[in-house]
Image: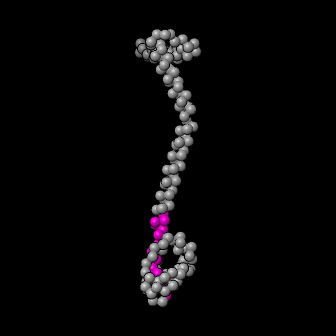
Amino acid sequence: MLHENDHYKEKDRSCLRSITLYHRNNNAAITVWKWWDTGVFTNQDMFSALQASFSAEYADIALGIGLKPVHYTVFGIVFVIIGSAVLIARREKVTVTEEATVMLECPYCKHQWRESMSKTHLKSMGYPRVRTLSRRKCPKCAKFIRPKIAATNV
Ligand SMILES: [Zn+2]
């Protein structure tokens, strides 16, 4: 019985504590609200300082709300820049990996030499169906020939 009583006391105490806390907070809020509502700030230093702090805080909040769209815009631009940079970097990486080494052969002197070109370029020329390149000078016999694609690493 005593134990239960203690329990209730404890409960009551905690309840009372929460009530007093609530009231204290409420009172503080009301006081602040009253300060705001009536604008009663005496010429005393403490209150003028309080007013200054409150007005500063309020201005900060207003500024925060005012700056929000700007912040979002700035963040958006930054992310777009980062995203496009990543995309470009990726594309460059892809083109680097898509680089193919082609062994070309002159149909006249049978000289072979290596050339690097992009795989997309190679495929656009019709490789592997078309195994010749556009006309160019052979580096050995200096004839204007269509080099044969002898081998690729594609
Ligand atoms: Zn040649």
Would residue 74 be found to the left or right of residue 3 on screen? right
Furthest-bottom residue in this view: 108
Image point (46%, 10%), residue name = 44
Would residue 29 be found to the left or right of residue 139 on screen? right
Say if the magenta span includes residue 121: no
Say if the magenta span includes residue 98: yes
Which region is colored magenta? 94-107
Q: Is residue 14 above or below residue 148?
A: above
Q: Is residue 110 above or below residue 27?
A: below
* x, y percent for residue 49: 46, 16
Image point (47%, 83%), residue name = 138
Image point (48%, 74%), residue name = 154
* x, y percent for residue 89: 47, 58
Image quadrant in which you'd find residue 46 = top left
| 21 and 110: which is toward the camera | 110
| 85 and 134: which is toward the camera | 134
Residue 19 visible in image: no
| 100 and 29: which is toward the camera | 100
* x, y percent for residue 62: 55, 28
Image point (49%, 10%), residue name = 43
* x, y percent for residue 24: 49, 15
Residue 6 visible in image: yes
